[in-house]
Image (tube, rainbow, N blue to C red):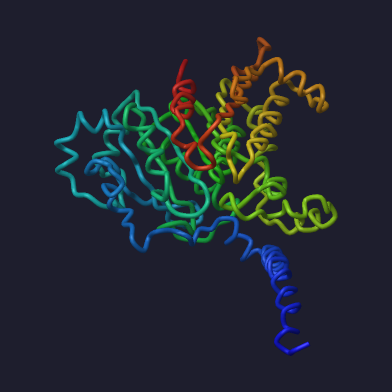
Amino acid sequence: MSPRGATWPSVLIAGLAAPFVLYITFIGLGSIPFFQRHFLYAHKINTLFWHDLDCPEYWAFARNQVTPFTLQTADGEKLYAWHVLPTSVYLKHEDALLKAAPGRSSAAESTAAFRLLKNDPDARVIVSFHGNAGHVAQGFRTDHYHSLTDTSNYHLLTIDYRGFGKSTGKPSETGLILDGVTLANWVMEVAGVPADRIVVMGQSLGTAVTSGVVEHFALQGVDFAGMILIAAFSNLPQLLTSYTAGGIVPVLSPIKNIQPVVRSIQKFIVDKWPSDDRIARIVENTSRRLRLTLIHAKNDAEIPYLQSNILFRSAAQAVLGKVLEDAEFETWKAGVTTVHDDGTFTAIATSSGQDQPDIIVREEIVRYGGHNHVMMSSTIPLAVMRSFEN
């Protein structure tokens, strides 16, 4: 056999082994907290090089409809934030807003947009937390803001978490929750909007932040008007056995049947984001009223909609006040579920005791939208409206 011919088996073996070696390398690096957090949060992947976040008109907002400003956290980080005015409010004050200087404000309380929020006794606010990677204006996020503010009277507030976009610091579970708490506190304490006129929502990673923020306040007896989780996940260790990054790259699903290996890898996960446990505690600690909505697309290729099923079960069992066996729970859920002809469904759990808080937990599985485009689903503004209903 010629030397040249002898190389073909080696090339073939190397070609077959390469994906395996890359996968093992990826898993190995993922066990190191520094790399793990970069993989999880992807906070360095953004379009800041060619997008100026201080010029929101690029994303089809009217001049000064969006006020960029900075918030400071209790541990000294500076968070980049947007305040999006509803178009209806903008129209009434258009002349004054057009005359204001554009750009980021270091003192949000001095802006015209802040005064419009602060001085409106009926103002309603959506606090929105985005997913991993990018910044406040990345991808479909601005379309999402438009869908919520273009035809309503809702103000929208959002931030880049620490380490994301123009915010300082490095991301971590406790850090991101503190960032979310900082924004919610600002809306309530500085802008003067009571919790019962605030809906807190998140998408993907933002659902975990939302759960952490709402739990923080629920333990203090504070009830928000609503809590909306879009494309949520139960907890990170469990998610990784079915998660596909970008809808293309599987994480632990190739080895999910090798349970000893999976459990060993899960032990190295630093930020666990246990939204299933947090949601149960939110229900258990609701003082007067809770409107919790889970929205997930059936064709989500990144986070399977079954993850929202897990969260619904956590919330529903907390409403019922007992843990059900699998078969018992499925029988109960079938009784509160409306199944549509396309295979999608709506399940609703409600509190029934006279002495219980007024709780409605709603799971909506829609047919289309994938992981990101679902943010433009009409089910989201509908969920906001239901949350604000008396």
53 is higher (above) or lower (below) than 124 = below
Q: x, y (%) of residue 212?
A: 59, 41
Asked if one can make out residue 140 in the rendered structure from this viewpoint, the answer is yes
Q: x, y (%) of residue 88?
A: 26, 28
Instruction: Give the number of callouts.
Output: 0
Which residue is drawn at the image coordinates 46% and 24% (left, top)?
A: 382
Q: x, y (%) of residue 241?
A: 72, 49
Which residue is drawn at the image coordinates 54% and 27% (left, top)?
A: 223
Q: Horizontal placement of 37 versus 107: left or right?
A: right
Residue that lies at the very extreme toward the bottom in this rendered image: 3
Q: x, y (%) of residue 297?
A: 56, 34
Which residue is drawn at the image coordinates 75% and 73% (left, top)?
A: 13
Residue that lies at the very extreme toward the front in this rendered image: 1
Tell which of 150 and 99 is nearer to you.
150
Q: Horizontal placement of 328 versus 297: left or right?
A: right
The quadrant the N terminus occupies is bottom right
Say which quarter of the image contains residue 359: top right
Q: Horizontal placement of 52 versus 132: left or right?
A: left
Residue that lies at the very extreme toward the right in this rendered image: 260
Say which quarter of the image contains residue 217: top right
Q: Horizontal placement of 40 versus 179: left or right?
A: right
388 is higher (above) or lower (below) than 193 = above
Asked if one can make out residue 361 in the rendered structure from this viewpoint, the answer is no
Tell which of 101 and 221 is nearer to you.
101
310 is higher (above) or lower (below) than 167 = above
